Image: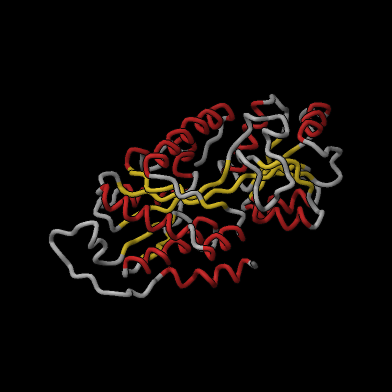
Amino acid sequence: MRRRDFMASVAGAVLVRPLRAVAQSGSETAQTWPTRPVRLIVGFAPGGPTDLIARLIAQPLGEKTGQNFVVENVPGAGGNVGAARVAKSAPDGYTFLVTGGNLTNNLYLFAEPGYALKDFDAVTLVAQTPVVLAVNPSVPASTVKELVAWIRANPGKESYASPGTGTPPQLVGALFQHALKLDLVHVPFDGGGTAVQATVGGHTPISFGAMAPAVPLIKAGQLRALAVTGKERSPTLPDIPTMAEAGFPDVEGATWTAVAAPAGTRKDVIAKLHDIVVAGLAQPDVKTKLAAMAYVPIGSSPQACADFFKSELSKWGEVIKEAGLKQE
């Protein structure tokens, strides 16, 4: 599915026409919630994966509840502006955050992100996609072990591209670099597409990249994929091993999208939102649209999502500190 076709297919989810009216009540219950439009805040501009997934889940939410679920883009400071807005919102069930790894990573990347993890209650981990380790076809490596040997034979001479400092692909690259004590130069780019194109052109021979822009180039033979960094193989690249299968089990990480609520939001409202999102993720058309972006649906429980946030904060916090990464 082409990107513009996918965006067109979900654009209507920004405003879903109510299917039934729900009476306003001073004693709203989970059964009657929501009685007015609900905001889904995305801390990035329209068109990126977090935004597209927000629009994708807005549709079943609107259809099931009969209320508008409005995707509101609040970009700025790597997602901090949107996250801070939700953190300061009333926990009334009418404002939620659709976010990625920036929620946890920025707590270490920025001196003052404007929020803390305790400001949110987790709803669900919606979907995730691995990072793909790929090289220019001229690189004399067909496996990760061969790549590591080549880097060690050329200390300080080789480089890897990423979509930008602090992005999940870059952090996986930093984990790879520091866990294996490799003398490797990081070259950040402004987005996944430009990063993988730099590797195609041979300017940065190695790429830790987003799946969506890399897969067509891999299938066209313009990039050679060596491994994916998820716990399991990607359905999009089923013949490519995981880093664990390649012999490096500690190099694992993914790009993910989750939903969170302002801390103190009623548990029954969170449970209802969670159940509708999870049911939506099971729909064949939703799975197809996620697969077009190389994402796999997850739909974790609120508790599992909260635990995931904490584990991501701990894991990538250590990587960020060790690599000395900072954002202004």
Question: Can the viewer see residue 286?
Answer: yes
Q: Residue furthest top?
A: 181
Location of residue 10 in the rendering, given as x and y in whole percent from the top left corner: 50, 69
Say left or right for 100 vs 148: left
Say left or right for 121 vs 47: left
Location of residue 317 in the rendering, given as x and y in whole percent from the top left corner: 50, 31
Question: For the image shown, how many numbered marks are present on the structure?
Answer: 0
Question: Can the viewer see residue 189?
Answer: no
Image: 136 above or below 324: below
Q: Quadrant of residue 324?
A: top right
Q: Nearer the viewer, residue 262 or 115?
A: 262
Q: Which of 132 and 187 is in front in this view?
A: 132
Q: Name the residue: 37% across, 54% down.
A: 275
Image: 312 above or below 298: above
Q: Which of 77 and 136 is in front in this view?
A: 136
Q: Which colour scheme is used?
A: secondary structure
Location of residue 328 in the rendering, given as x and y in whole percent from the top left corner: 49, 42
Q: Name the residue: 67% across, 53% down.
A: 236
Image: 198 above or below 26: above
Q: Name the residue: 65% across, 51% down.
A: 235
Say left or right for 135 vs 123: right
Say left or right for 270 vs 298: left
On-image quarter of the N terminus: bottom right
Q: Residue furthest left?
A: 26
Location of residue 2 in the rendering, given as x and y in whole percent from the top left corner: 65, 68
